[in-house]
Image (cartoon, rainbow, N blue to C red):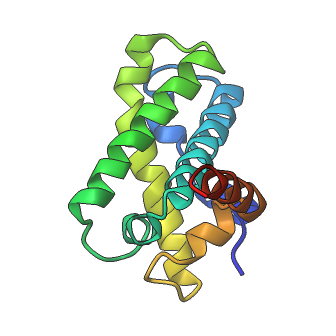
Amino acid sequence: MFGLDDLMKKVDLGDILEKVGLSEQDKAAVTNQAADAVKYRVNKENAKGNVDTIKNLFSQNENTEAANGMAGKLEGDLAFNLKNKLGLDEGIIDQIKSVVMAKFMGGTSNAMAEGGDKEGGSVLDMFGDSDLVNTFKNKLGGLFS
């Protein structure tokens, strides 16, 4: 199984980030924040039952409208992380968020395809937090009992 650590080694955002003057340390931090944004969104969408949307977004298939909507949310999640966790300037964030997230998701999708998963199912193994999702679902279920 291809893991998150393997993916982080494969996704190189250096060329993009060099253009806006970020240091090597900043590049690693941006990559980590992209992974955090994906983990946050995958878990949030999984808790809502949007597994097919998650898989579609990270598959080799054409994106559905829902998957494109999730991609937009991922850019917002990344922008939030870059501003609030790294303190990057909004001008830089606006320049890089779309490209960084597209490249990160493409790297993830390609890595999964190389491992034999062209349908995007392993993204849940890579980024999903099943204990967190199950706890969240159980709490929500209790609200409607």
Q: How many labels does the image show?
A: 0
Q: 75 left or right of 66?
A: right
- Residue at the (54%, 89%) spot, across then down: 116
Q: 82 left or right of 24?
A: left
In this view, the residue farthest toward the left is 65
Which x, y percent locates residue 96? 41, 30
Question: In this view of the protein, which residue sits in the foreground, 129 or 38?
Answer: 129
Quarter of the N terminus within the rendering: bottom right
Q: 72 left or right of 35?
A: left
Vertical placement of residue 73 versus 47, above or below: above
Question: In this view of the protein, which residue sits in the foreground, 44 or 6?
Answer: 44
Which x, y percent locates residue 70? 37, 50
Q: 134 left or right of 41?
A: right
Quarter of the C terminus within the rendering: bottom right
Residue 58 in sight from this viewpoint: yes
Vertical placement of residue 40 versus 132, above or below: above
Which x, y percent locates residue 76? 42, 32
- Residue at the (47%, 69%) spot, across then down: 51
Quarter holding residue 37: top right
Question: In this view of the protein, which residue sits in the foreground, 74 or 137?
Answer: 137
In this view, the residue farthest toward the bottom is 116
Vertical placement of residue 64 versus 8, above or below: below
Which x, y percent locates residue 117? 52, 84
Residue 9 in sight from this viewpoint: no
- Residue at the (44%, 36%) spot, across then down: 16
Question: In this view of the protein, which residue sits in the foreground, 19 or 92?
Answer: 92
- Residue at the (55%, 76%) spot, across then down: 112
